[in-house]
Amino acid sequence: MNDQANRLRALARTQVPEATLFTSRVMAIASGKGGVGKTNVVAGLAMALAQLGQRVVVLDADFGLANLDILLGLSPEYTLEHVLRGEKLMEEILLDGPFGIRIIPASSGIQELTRLDAAAEMRLIQGLQRISATSDWLLIDTAAGIHDSVIKLLMAAQEVLLVTTPEPTALVDAYAMVKVVHLRDPHKPLWLLVNNAQSQDEAEETIEQLQAATRRFLNRDLHVLGMLPSDPFILQAVRQQRGVVELFPQAPSALALHSAARQLQEKIPLQKDGFAAFWKGLSAEEP
Ligand SMILES: Nc1ncnc2c1ncn2[C@@H]1O[C@H](COP(=O)(O)OP(=O)(O)O)[C@@H](O)[C@H]1O
Ligand SMILES: [Mg+2]
């Protein structure tokens, strides 16, 4: 690593400007397997939290399949790529979504956040820092799988929400994800949401299977956030590029999202330095 990078990293670790002392909760949403509904969950939770009066920012950090903007019918002119290159400020690329949520759009082909050069990293962190100053939640939609770059984001976040479906393949990959996170930090708060369940029984069975494995092999429990049923209203909302919470507030999945958002709001403690901790986590060098 070059000298400049070392200097900037050292700076990021030691200097936490006063402006970082906010109460933004940082939650990364992860999945072992792709296609389990992670992006729909992120968008839905963001809207449901916003309806509870929370100020929410969503960062699309799934650079391979950056599609949060498409899901919400937004057409970004600029993306995080422009911020990282120093061509735009974070404020200039923010998109306004439903219920006042704000979205930081990505584009495919952005360098992984953990492999940025020092200047790009500082642009990212300082931009996020300013945005977080006026938000209660930062939700991060991450790429599926246990790549190092994803795990690093998860380790930096205050809370991790794992999304899985009841499918055996998704479940196995979800367990692999829990294991990797747990081995890095046994105290990282891990939440579980089962999506696309055919019934309450199926969701409960899925939760029980995963809990049994984590108890037996890792000696820990997951926090259960609940389940989202398989819901045709989600597909209809996706086709219209709107959120199910917005379009069909009485749909089963929308009601479940509201209940999940209320739980998060009640159970996740405010951390005075939530974002500062995220910042330090992202800037920390690999051991
Ligand atoms: N609860 C659900 N019921 C029905 N379809 C769903 C549900 N959740 C997600 N889907 C569908 O699954 C597909 C993948 O969802 P997406 O959120 O893009 O997954 P991921 O971000 O994990 O790749 C989408 O077509 C979406 O409409
Ligand atoms: Mg996605």
Image (cartoon, rainbow, N blue to C red):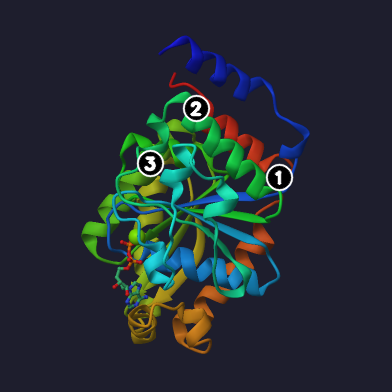
Residue farthest toward the left in the current orientation of the protein: 169
Q: Are marks 3 and 1 in contact (CB under 8 Å)?
A: no
Q: Residue furthest top?
A: 3
Circle 2: element type: helix
Task: Tell me the residue that label 2 is attached to.
Answer: 119
In primary-sequence order, the first of circles 3 and 1 is 3
Q: Residue 150, image x and y in percent? A: 38, 41
- State the SS at label 1: loop
Residue flagged by tag 2: what amino acid is it?
Ala
Quadrant for the N terminus in the image = top left
Q: Which quarter of the rendered image does ligand 2 occupy?
A: bottom left
Give the left or right position of residue 109, taking residue 114 as reference: left
Q: Amino acid at mark 3?
A: Val
- Residue at which label 3 appears: 150
How many residues crowd around disc 1 within 10 Å: few (fewer than 14), some, or many (20 or more)? some
* Residue highlighted by disc 1: 271
Q: Looking at numbered disc 1 in the image, what kind of residue is underneath it?
A: Gln
In the picture, residue 266 is in which quadrant? Answer: bottom right
Is residue 187 at all visible to an observer of this figure?
A: no
Q: Position of residue 216 (x, y in %)?
A: 38, 45
**Marks 2 and 3, how far apart in space?**
21 Å
Q: Residues within 10 Å of mark 3 (few under 14, many from 20)?
A: many
Q: Residue furthest right?
A: 18
Q: Position of residue 2 (x, y in %)?
A: 43, 12
